[in-house]
Image (spheres, helix red, strand yellow):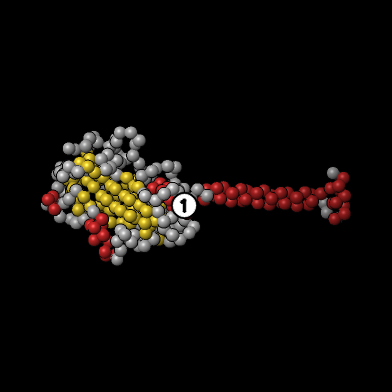
């Protein structure tokens, strides 16, 4: 206290002025500490977003779309009305390539780069620039038409089944032939399914810690349970419905880092028709 009084006398200021100045300095110091603390928290949050830092991307090696039921559910890249005989059980790479010609690309040339989305339909790159579908270094999008022989609900399934020619078809999965650590690419992949009447559902094949505000679903570890989470859309008897399918690499997934660059992907989708209680229609 003697030191403070001596300083006050030396500088010819009152005790009140002296303490007022010190209180102001203390408030400034507290604000600075609070600001630095906020920056530290933001730094920890951002560290969970593992965008690529090098400009090389992942390629789509193969894409298969199968209907894993008998005659009840079919699909086509075109709308054939109620003429169910013109619909098929398998969408091939060649069919998707035919769709992609208007974008001057093909599955073989399709290169994915990290993008993100909050709604499953509009996408941006890391710094907020809009990403367009089917451009080199963006995401894959195509449309197809589903039709059923009766009223039904269409689900994505991990279960295999026989097609109409009794050949066994695997269930839905995303795989890669790339070695570790590139093989972690399968954990950063998302697949979206959207119709005008049923909204948007997003499948995360190897779901881990939530990485974005977009809600996703995955498959149970045991027996397949058909419920609202994996129900994609409904169909009325002999009434085709257009669905938009999107495949992207989620830039905010922790596995979407430099280790998975130059990896290849193989995507297989299997769909099943169920009744309102989730029982497969055979």
Q: Is residue 202 visible?
A: no
Q: Which residue is identified by label 1? A: 259
Find residue 165 and report its image quarter: top left
Question: Which residue appears at 39% of the width and 42% of the height?
Answer: 207
Question: Which residue appears at 18% of the width and 55% of the height?
Answer: 79
Q: Position of residue 62 (x, y in %)?
A: 30, 53
Q: How many labels, in total?
A: 1
Q: What is the quadrant of the N terminus in the image?
A: top right
Residues packed near mark 1 inside 10 Å, few (<14), some (14 to 19) or many (20 plus): some
Asked which secondary structure carries label 1, the reply is helix
Q: Nearer the viewer, residue 183 or 217?
A: 183
Residue 39 left/right relative to 164: right
Q: Is residue 211 visible?
A: yes
Q: Position of residue 227 (x, y in %)?
A: 29, 37
Q: What is the quadrant of the C terminus in the image?
A: top left
Find residue 278 and report its image quarter: top left
Residue 281 left/right relative to 176: left
Q: Position of residue 269 (x, y in %)?
A: 28, 47
Residue 17 left/right relative to 199: right
Question: Which residue appears at 30% of the width and 63% of the height?
Answer: 105
């Amino acid at each position: 206290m003697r030191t403070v009084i001596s300083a006050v006398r030396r500088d010819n200021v009152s005790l009140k002025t002296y303490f007022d100045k010190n209180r102001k300095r203390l408030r400034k110091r507290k604000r600075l500490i609070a600001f630095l603390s906020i920056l530290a928290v933001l730094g920890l949050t951002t560290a969970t977003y593992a965008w690529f830092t090098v400009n090389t991307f992942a390629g789509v090696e193969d894409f298969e779309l199968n209907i894993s039921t008998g005659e009840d559910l079919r699909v086509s890249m075109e709308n054939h009305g109620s003429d169910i005989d013109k619909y098929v059980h398998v969408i091939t790479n060649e069919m998707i390539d035919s769709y992609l010609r208007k974008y001057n690309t093909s599955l073989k040339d399709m290169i994915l780069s990290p993008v993100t989305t909050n709604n499953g339909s509009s996408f941006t790159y890391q710094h907020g620039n809009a990403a367009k579908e089917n451009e080199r270094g963006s995401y894959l999008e195509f449309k197809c038409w589903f039709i059923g022989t009766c009223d039904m609900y269409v689900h994505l399934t991990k279960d295999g089944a026989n097609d109409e020619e009794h050949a066994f078809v695997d269930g839905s999965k995303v795989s890669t032939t790339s070695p570790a650590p590139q093989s972690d690419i399968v954990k950063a992949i998302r697949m979206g399914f959207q119709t005008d009447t049923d909204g948007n559902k997003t499948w995360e094949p190897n779901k881990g810690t939530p990485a974005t505000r977009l809600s996703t679903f995955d498959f149970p570890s045991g027996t397949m349970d058909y419920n609202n989470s994996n129900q994609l859309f409904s169909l009325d008897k002999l009434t085709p419905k257009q669905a938009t399918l999107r495949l992207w690499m989620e830039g905010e997934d922790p596995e979407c880092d430099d280790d998975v660059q130059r990896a290849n992907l193989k995507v297989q989708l299997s769909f099943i028709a169920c009744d309102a209680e989730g029982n497969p229609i055979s």
